[in-house]
Image (cartoon, rainbow, N blue to C red):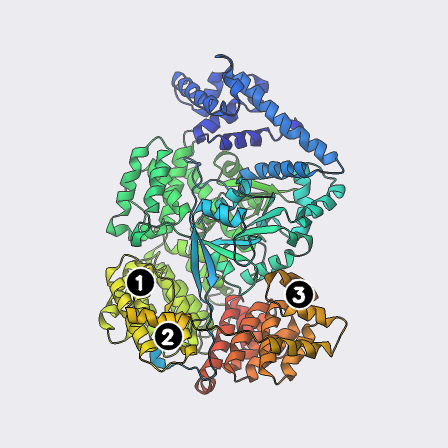
Amino acid sequence: MEFWDGWDDFLKVIASDHKLTVPQEAVLLVRLSRQSINGKRTNQDIANEVIGGEPNTALSAYNKRMAEVLAKLSQSFPKINSKSTKKVERTQTCLEKAYLEQQNPKKSEASSHQIASHDWTQICRDMLESQKLNIRRQATEVVSKAFYVELGLVERKHQPRRSDDFSVSPEQGAGFFQLHEEEITQTYEHEEFLEQVIKQGQSKKSQGRRIAIIGEPGAGKTTLLEAIAFSPKTPGFSIWVSLGSLRDKSLEEYLRQKWLKDALKTSDVMEQQKELENLFKSGEVLLLLDGVDEMPASSPVEALAKLREELTGWVADARTVLTCRQNVWDASVNALPGFDTYRTLDFSYGESNKPDQVRQFICEWFSQTEKPEVGEPLREKLDEDRHQRIRDLVKNPLRLSLLCQSWYFRQGDLPNTKAALYEQFARAFYDWKQEQFPTTPTKRKELNTALGLLAREAIDQEKSRFAIRESFAIDVMGEDLFKLATEKLHWLNFVYKDAETDEKVYAFFHPTFQEYFAACAIDNWDYFLNHNNETPNPFQQYNGKSSAYRVFDRQWKEVILLWLGREDIHKQKKEEFIKVLVNFDDGCGNEKFYGYQSYFLGVTGIGDFSDCSRADEIIRQAVELIFNKPIDCYHPITQGTWEVLKKTEQSKAIKFLTNILRTCQEDIETCHESARLLMEIDPANSLAERAFLYAVNALIEEQIINSGMSQDEQEAFLSRINKPTPIVFSVDAECMDAIDNLVESPDYCDDDETCEQLSNNFEKQDNEKKPSYLDLLFMDEPIHWEYAQELAHMDIKTLAQLLRTTQDKSILCLTAFRLGHVASGNVDANDALIDLLRTSNDFDVYHLVAGSLKAILQNNLFSATVSGLKDCLTNQDYENDSEHFRYCYEIIWYCAQNMTYPDFYQAWHSQFYPV
């Protein structure tokens, strides 16, 4: 029977390729299973198993479904319709022939010493087909069609040059110096992206060779990657790797051992490993890396740094497309600098001249079902004012799919939170499976409890939290419930076998469901945060047990929000949790590095706990926090508050922003910023549009036309107001002329003389090695970076020493800047940059050193950096040089985002010694 082991998976691929509905697929899988073929089961036997109920009714339904299946399959296998009788037998013959053709080439390929190019094409294609079943299950099984979202190209905003005497008054607002902002510069429809970026290689940084697709959970990243894998527009040889499956292996080891063995169906691949390497070196491989956020790593920065190390050698010769959760991608600065970044965009509701994509999705989804008429009532229900929260939630493709399936089975009212949405889907899921696999309410509760425990423990303990080993799952759930979840209900699905142990690995059919079940397994909020706020110390017990700080771990954020949205949790418990979140004292000075992180989570959590008694107070404080900072020394706080206001209870945020707009006519800066934020939260808000247009015209007139600003200052101002908005705004003719004159002025030139001077300094020290290295080091073309990184270790100490000895500002700045690109994780470079930042009093040096430090920080360097810069955050430092204070604050804030709270606490309370 070994030869037929892949038969069931083959039938599932056939079902998927021919767009069979779930009931049709069930009939096909049972009727043409090897058991049915060998056992010669009757149609009545199969009808009783698949459909059940009254025998004659079941047989009639079976015959109807089987006829539908044969009609669809006959499009690819015309011989099925060659005669009017024995169609099922002819279908079996056609499919067995196709299966044999698929298996036999693989055996000959595996034994061959040389694999031709056209054979690699088939090998990669067959491997993709076998992986297709396990890439990710459809979010809903009533409709199997994939839906695609728009993509937005993400670019860093240009940071204008500034003169030495450039300054800003406190009255000019908190948003004046926002550095490194990102914006969407171009949007792509699905087919446009495949044609222009994937096929033609039209991308700014990498010419289509390095593509990152980022987005929120359930935003369609894996769906898009799968579309790239199977699109006829995709050139070359596509190889798919789910990064969570790497575990302890490097990417190169995984490709040589696990992927190649699976693709060739043999354990002896010594001869073919060199051929695989040569295939990569040809530059024709498209490496599809799914789930950077699922890699085994202690922090997002470590995950991205690990991937950067993996994309070297012959693996780096492949074109690469990866997917990553947005919060992980955003955690690191320049971790993968050569990648063009594309963000999945939410569906729109028809606001601001955009199409009503939610309506389009609902109509198309229900048109694929037997109840197309119930789609429009769902859209009308979403339009009701009281459903604003769920309306915002289902701009996400996964959640909209879940809502459609739940509505398909149970029309009625809509849920108000993400947790309620997932709970509603879980009930609908059981209802849908009830006919085929009956379960009692008691058994459902028992299974849900076991799934919750498994989900929670996997997130907390497993190396790859979304890849769950079979033995781990059975230990947690018990064998009977595990079989129910995997073999019948498919809450858990087999994804791959571990390369070393050959153990099966399973996953929830989408990571968000693992997070939902985990949230359901947590009774009290002290699982997330157990902390003595009176005498903060993470190394001491509190309430008789160890301190807990999962609120600061990114992998627990969604779980926490889902917990707050649970309707079965007593309101008082949620009130207590929100209170400790917004009042957290980290015991690390007055800057609240973890206090603000906790506060932001509390503000966000109001969105899932809208009846919190302190909701108005907390959201009002958050709005005031944006506009009450006297100067932008606390940009991360301003930026963080801005982001959480877009995710919290929107009706309350809109209310407070509207109040500010109605009272700030004399404060143009506040009017401009509050109107822009209000338009991001509520794009159709007419008051915000009017206020925004008024403020833009007033600011241009005040800052460009009627001021004595230098060109540097005017560039900075124009950059500040030139932020993406939901509307295209017009300005007065006089204002437009002023902008044109500024933009058309000559650009600053790069200082080639300074670069040459720096090269000469190095040549005097080592004429044999360093000139060629420096030729690469000081080039800006991305293609040179990989080679420069390979050579960089020979010269980093010299670069670090130069930072400590040179008196030339230009050399200092260039050296600091380039260290950020070639010294990742290097102790000498980190120490030298910290020393320079501590002792410098120059704005340009602050800016360059801060960027380079963020780029090279890894592992134990975070602690050293916190210890080295914490003494720069005194009130005296703030009064003497607020810019120096700001950059030191931003770097330590960055460290706090990538360290555990206990590690940060320990670093803060230790003395600074070079690592």
Give whichever of 873, 308 is nearer the camera. Answer: 308
Q: Is residue 411 in sight in this rendering?
A: no
Residue in view at x 36 percent, y 53 percent:
565
- Numbered-mark total: 3
- Residue 154: % across, % down: 46, 59
- Residue 10: % across, % down: 57, 30
Give whichever of 369, 907 is nearer the camera. Answer: 369
Q: Is residue 506 above or below residue 817?
A: above
- Residue 389: % across, % down: 31, 53
Q: Earlier in the sequence, mark 2 or mark 3?
A: 2
Dot 2 corresponds to which residue? 174
Label 1: few (<14), some or many (≥20) within 10 Å? few
The mark lying in front, picked from 2 and 3, is: 3
- SS for callout 2: loop
Label 2: few (<14), some or many (≥20) within 10 Å? many
Give whichever of 438, 324 is nearer the camera. Answer: 324
The three-letter amino acid code for the residue at tag 3 is Ala
Give whichever of 410, 742 is nearer the camera. Answer: 742
Dot 1 corresponds to which residue? 729
Q: CA distance from mark 2 to mark 3?
A: 39 Å
Q: Is residue 30 left or right of residue 822?
A: left
Dot 3 corresponds to which residue? 788
Q: Earlier in the sequence, mark 3 or mark 1?
A: 1
The three-letter amino acid code for the residue at tag 2 is Ala
Q: CA distance from mark 3 to mark 1?
A: 44 Å
The mark lying in front, picked from 2 and 1, is: 1
